[in-house]
Amino acid sequence: MRIIMGWTVRCEDSMEKKIKKIGVLASGGDAPGMNAAIRGVTLAAARAGISTVGILEGYEGLLHSRFLPLSVEDVSGVIDRGGTFLRTARSPEFATPEGVRKAAENAEKAELDAVVVIGGDGSFRGALDLSAAGVPVIGIPGTIDNDIGCTEYTIGFDTAMNTAMEAVDRIRDTAYSHERCSIVEVMGRRAGYIAYYTAIACGADIMLLPEDTLDFDRDVIAPLRAARDAGKREFLIVAAEGADGLDVLPEKIERDFGVKPTYSVLGYIQRGGSPTLRDRTMASLMGERAIACLLRGDEDRIIAVRNGEICALPIQEALAMKKELSASAIRAGKNLSCQ
Ligand code: ADP
């Protein structure tokens, strides 16, 4: 008991000594739900008596001291807005030793006791550099691609998948009227999570993923022919942008399957829009967890979801973690398609 009380007192002492003001920034690609995370950080910090400063345009803003103090009122009305009101940026200058040093100096000048970084893998590598330069950091995973190794979930992923699903549904509606093959390309250069889940949710006939190597005749044309022989008249292919051979896919389908396909690239439509319930709640709770970590004295952590639970991992350990769609998950998805 005394030990626990002693720990509590130490923890509160260190909070009073160490954490008075924090910075929060969004970095890399924007994702719906980043605003909810900024709000979660600001509200949880305010509740603990910590003031929050928004850093504009990611690490660029830290390099040029572009700060925006955030009160509880300032983050009212942002939870349902896509993008990030702090704006985000990529900063080549920050990714140099000189840039990191300058950013750390500016954080110190602004009396920031810690910086919360909302972004992807690249942003977390930057956060690690910043922590090595003496600025405590907490990372919150924000990217529509869900391609961060340490976490099952990233902010923006759910909204992007739902946007893609609705768009594919619309494209498929018109395909019902003709014998048609619709190819829909969704985002995902290195990871096919959006394509995988959208393909399942839309009942796609073929899914094309960067994780997969295909024999075109065996894995695409033969299943399409078999489906047509069984009476199917419209065909849907959902492809991640990083899947192999997309540049020649339409001509191959036309030549070998005898149907001229339509090809739709969903592109940036998937990045925008009001975040879904899942993105809003996960982002808010991750923001809250970031502050809880700092209050406990747990610096240099990445907030992650593992086994469905929000947790905090040491940043170096988190960055070394890998994940990918497993072969069995891909097989299960394909068992629901024609492949
Ligand atoms: P994301 O965070 O979405 O993966 P980027 O890879 O574009 O996006 O990274 C965002 C920013 O993080 C970069 O512009 C750069 O300032 C910083 N960054 C990226 N990679 C590194 C790295 N290896 N070391 C230090 N900083 C990095």
Image (cartoon, helix red, strand yellow):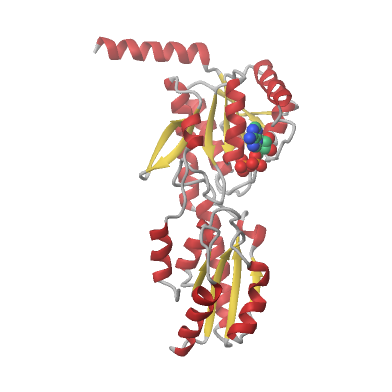
Query: Seen in the image, is 308 located left or right of residue 302?
Result: left
Measured as percent of width and height from the top left, residue 98 is found at: 73, 23
Measured as percent of width and height from the top left, residue 143 is found at: 57, 47
The quarter of the rendering in which ligand 1 is drawn is top right
Image point 46% across, 72% down: which residue? 203
Q: Quadrant of residue 130?
A: top right
Classify 18 as above or below 225: above
Quick one: 266 or 219, which is closer to the camera? Answer: 219
Classify 21 as above or below 278: above
Q: Is residue 61 visible?
A: yes
Classify 40 as above or below 263: above
Quick one: 315 or 85, which is closer to the camera? Answer: 315
Image point 64% across, 83% down: which residue? 255
Question: From this viewpoint, which residue is outermost toward the left?
Answer: 1
For the N terminus, the image quarter is top left
Quick one: 89 or 39, which is closer to the camera? Answer: 89
Image point 69% across, 27% down: which residue? 62
Measured as percent of width and height from the top left, residue 339 is found at: 45, 73
Measured as percent of width and height from the top left, residue 18 is found at: 52, 14
Picture mark count: 0
Q: Is residue 71 visible?
A: no
Q: Quadrant of residue 78?
A: top right
